[in-house]
Amino acid sequence: MTTSQKSDDNQITPTPQAVAPAAKPVGAPAAKPAVAPAAPAPADHSTPLDEARKFARVTEDGHVFVIIDGTEHPVGQYPDATEDEALAYFVRKYDDVVSQMMLLEQRVAAKAPSGDMAKTIDSIAALVSERAMVGDIAALETRLETLRTAVESLGKEQRRATEQARAEQQKIREGIVVQAEELAGKNPEQIQWKTASQTMNGLFDAWKEAQRSSVRLPRSTEDALWKRFRAARTTFDRHRRAYFSQLDAQNAEAKKVKEALIERAEALQNSTDWAGTAAEYRKLMDEWKKSRRASRKDDDALWGRFRAAQDVFFQARAEQNAKVDASFRENLVVKEALLEEARALLPIKDLNAAKKSLESIRDRWEAAGKVPRGDLQRVEAALRHVEDAVRNAEDEQWRRSNPETKARSNSMLSQLQDTIAQLEEDLEQAKKKGNEKKIAAAQEALDARRMWLNTLEKSAADFQ
């Protein structure tokens, strides 16, 4: 008997440990608040002595017997004490076991993790089987079997939930792996690397979070998925490094090409060949546009240098043009006056006089010299307008006096008049015969020819 030892007179005497509160049975689970809410600790069970006497007999010398289904079983001896003290000692042992069962029942009701509950039941059952306590042992055994069935049922339910959680977690992990493999399998030239890298890092974080906070997968399954995920990340990183290595090489080559263009631009920036150098700068700009871009930082700096070289030249040209324009403003005043003189020729009434005046204006126009660039197109267009009007008047006069045109017009008039005379004769013949169909046809043809004759006669009058 673990709670007592034999004395020299072969009596069973309680040890100090026997009267201490019962220890936690071996195998009782530690609390896991993160997994399931802890069941509230039950109040200590206390069996009244009057109730306990129904299941016990105590001798005068302190021997205690427990009665189970009418049969007495020796429990132990509590010498040098009253019957109530001896009985209370062994009742406390019973109450300790009942308290352990109550605690386990509450854990089952709270659906706490059931992994160690079977061991706890076995431990309690071992204590009950020793019969080293006083109480309703038969009811305790029945209650213990009911509790064992509840624990088994809870275990099955939790195992099903665990398997379902594992299946869901495996699906999540497989989804992470598939996304990583899809990223790794894309053409590196078609990947937006900043976004793709963020996505891959997010997948890795999701994997770690799943490992940390979710149900664990079987080792073989998790290892296989991890190997696929790790391989996809390795491939992705290799493609990214290769892409950016190639990009760096391309950027270096683009930078080299643009630096050569900058050298050519800087060599021209002090030229005073305004027209020729401006053309060269246009060619350089075309080459710049066709060249590859370097990195954003380098390309912006290179463009700044290229543009600065152009600005030196074009600023100098603008200053020179400003000086030239100042000397041309006096010429503009002369040409503005000539334009007023030219506009006065319109509308043209005397072509010969207008031609003579315009020739004089042209001579003085050329003698006046250049005007500022900003006014050149405007004044030239205004003079061309007058020149075009004189030219059109001259063409119209020629058209009216052209002998060939007159002869052609007279010939057409003669032919049309002959045709009309023939149609008039045909109409008379048709009327004599009373042929309505021929009358209508002849009349229609005659009306059309007379209309043409009227139009042609008006045109011919213009040549008179």
Image: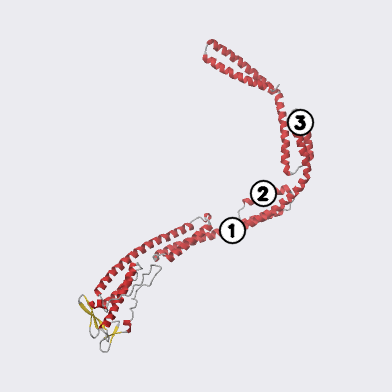
Residue 19 versus residue 32 in the image, above or below: below
| Callout 1 amino acid | Ala
Q: Which residue is mark 2?
A: 283
According to the image, label 3 marks what residue? 355
Q: Nearer the viewer, residue 434 or 80?
A: 80
How many angstroms separate mark 3 from mark 2 (CA)? Answer: 45 Å
Amino acid type, mark 2? Lys
**For numbered disc 3, what is the local secondary structure?**
helix
Residue 82, which numbered label? none
- Residue 285 in percent (x, y) is at 66, 50
Q: Residue at x 43, y 58 (%)?
A: 175
- Residue 343 shown left or right of residue 254 in the figure: right
* Residue that lies at the very extreme toward the bottom in this rendered image: 8
The residue sitting at the left extreme is 70
Instruction: Report the amino acid beneath label 3.
Output: Lys
Query: Residues at badges 1 and 2 in contact (C-beta under 8 Å)?
Result: no
Instruction: Look at discs 3 and 2 and give the one toward the viewer.
Output: 3
Answer above or below: position of 369 versus 21.
above
Question: Sequence-wise, which precedes: disc 3 or disc 2?
Answer: 2
Q: Position of residue 116 (x, y in %)?
A: 34, 71
Can residue 408 be seen by looking at this rendering? no
User: SS class of the residue under badge 1?
Assistant: helix
Q: Horizontally, is 350 left or right of 105 in the view?
A: right
Q: Marks 1/3: CA distance? A: 71 Å
Decide: few, some or many residues near mark 3? Use Cα within 10 Å; few <14, some 14-19, many ≥20.
some
Vertical order, 417 against 138 (above or below): above
Question: Image quadrant of residue 129?
Answer: bottom left
Q: Is residue 64 visible?
A: yes
Residue 334, image x and y in percent?
78, 39
> How far from the left and from the top, in percent, is residue 449?
60, 19
Dot 1 corresponds to which residue?
Answer: 249
Task: Please state, as top left, top right, bottom left or bottom right, where the N terminus lies in the image.
Answer: bottom left
